[in-house]
Amino acid sequence: MMPIASPSRVELSEPLALLRWLESDPVSVSLGAIDPIELWGLVALAARARTDGEAPLRVNLEQASRSCQFARAVGFEDVLSGAGGLASAAAERGRTVKLARIQRHASTEPPSDQISRLLVADPALEDTRRTLYYVLNELLRNVVQHSQDRLGGIVGAQLNRGGRNSDLPMVQVAVVDAGIGIPVSLQSRHTSLADAGAALEKSLWPHISSTFDEGETGSAQNAGMGLFFISEMTKLVGGRLVIATRGATLTLQGDENFEDPHGIQKVHKGVGYPGTLVAFEMPVDAVQDYDSMIETIRERARERTPRRAIHKWLSFEAPPAGTFKFVVRSTGVEDAREAQRFSEDQLMPRLVKRQSVALDFVGIPTCTQSYVHALLYEALRLAWARKTPIYILNAQPAVKSTLELLENYALGG
Ligand SMILES: Nc1ncnc2c1ncn2[C@@H]1O[C@H](COP(=O)(O)OP(=O)(O)O)[C@@H](O)[C@H]1O
Ligand SMILES: [Mg+2]
């Protein structure tokens, strides 16, 4: 391919210039020639420039330019060699965190928690921090579960109060891998998807996943809801989402006025990223009430999940005497893998024997769909098959609603 010049600016509002240039397979770039470069651009370059990767892109950051200083401040050079390790650290507390690698077999909740706390430390912005946690965790899970990049992925986050953002401070997060890409992953199951653009568009639908067939609503580990939730969040917070993957790029601009919270979505075919790049940006103070935002998204998910008979194998009533009780301990950070293990070791063997079980959610104000899915998707299907209810105790409204959505889809598909 003809070498083309690197772009002079890299901003999320105009993502195609950097993507087109990366598709021309450049061998080197002088970072000083790009100004400004937003964080997502650095992450996009870093994933191509990992020194343990194949044919790494050489990124020259010797100059004293703003972009080179920015790159050094976020630990760009360390993440290339993997020296930065998994644990991420504050570059400038409350502004940027150091770029970090997520390893292929890592659990995703601790780094998501750590990064969102470092970036949004102000307790007044708790709802924003929880939104970022959700987005980071789903994106990192996707790298770990689907990318097949042996080096894992790279994650970065920035809080931007300056420049064009001085009136409207923004947070931006980016997660990038150099793996197989969304279309190849999804087409392995959904063979009728015509091209990369169609596959990318489909990946945002609820209950679409490479881990189960269309018409079903989940597998042991997945509900196919990650990208759906992230895209709905983008709309509701008036944010911006860019997903670039092999063969296509999707851009979504949310509506800041909340009047038509559906946003403008476009798919650009023929320009993508050699792997998967997801960048998400939102105004820092856009989320006033995280729980009601999640509730709105759940409602939209329910509308798009086929209506089926109503089952009641999750019971919020008092369990009969002799029921095994488990307290779902809150350690502060969720762990979906541990939840799944607990389900397999403790819940399912009892349900197989038609012994009913009770789960006590005391002290847990909220949990993500991924976590509840890992904990109860298979157990609930088993409860239905064995006609043995699972009792739920002390569920707060936000937890109850998460469980009800799970029951709605788990017993349908
Ligand atoms: N980083 C990635 N690399 C490859 N494929 C991906 C990546 N992220 C998402 N996908 C594809 O998009 C699908 C939908 O993702 P998602 O909505 O998070 O649902 P789930 O992860 O539960 O399957 C995945 O099943 C996978 O096929
Ligand atoms: Mg996912």
Image (cartoon, helix red, strand yellow):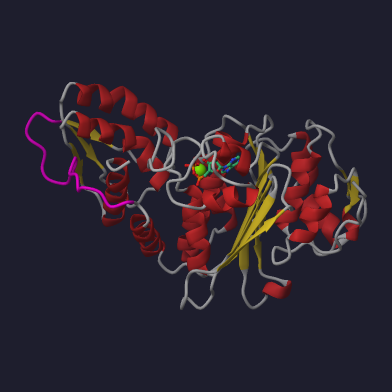
Report x, y in % for residue 24: 85, 48
Image quadrant in which you'd find residue 411: top left
Q: Which quadrant holds the C terminus?
A: top left
Report x, y in % for residue 250: 63, 57
Overall secondary structure of the magenta stretch? loop
Height in image: 379 above or below 202? above
Instruction: Please tell me which residue lies in front, 184 or 45.
Output: 184
In this view, the residue farthest toward the left is 321
Instruction: Please tell me which residue lies in front, 196 or 229.
Output: 196
Q: Residue at x 88, y 56 (%)?
A: 6
Can residue 294 be seen?
A: yes
Image quadrant in which you'd find residue 157: bottom right
Residue 316 highlighted magenta (yes or no): yes
On screen, residue 411 versus residue 339, left or right, reads left
Q: Residue at x 75, y 55 (%)?
A: 41
Residue 74 highlighted magenta (yes or no): no
Q: Residue at x 15, y 25 (%)?
A: 354
Q: Which residues are magenta?
A: 306-323
Instruction: Please tell me which residue lies in front, 305 or 118.
Output: 305
Report x, y in % for residue 286: 51, 70
Report x, y in % for residue 321: 6, 32
Q: Residue at x 32, y 29 (%)?
A: 343
Image quadrant in which you'd find residue 52: top right
Can residue 91 be seen?
A: no
Height in image: 142 above or below 341? below
**Count of numbered marks:** 0
On screen, residue 74 versus residue 139, left or right, reads right
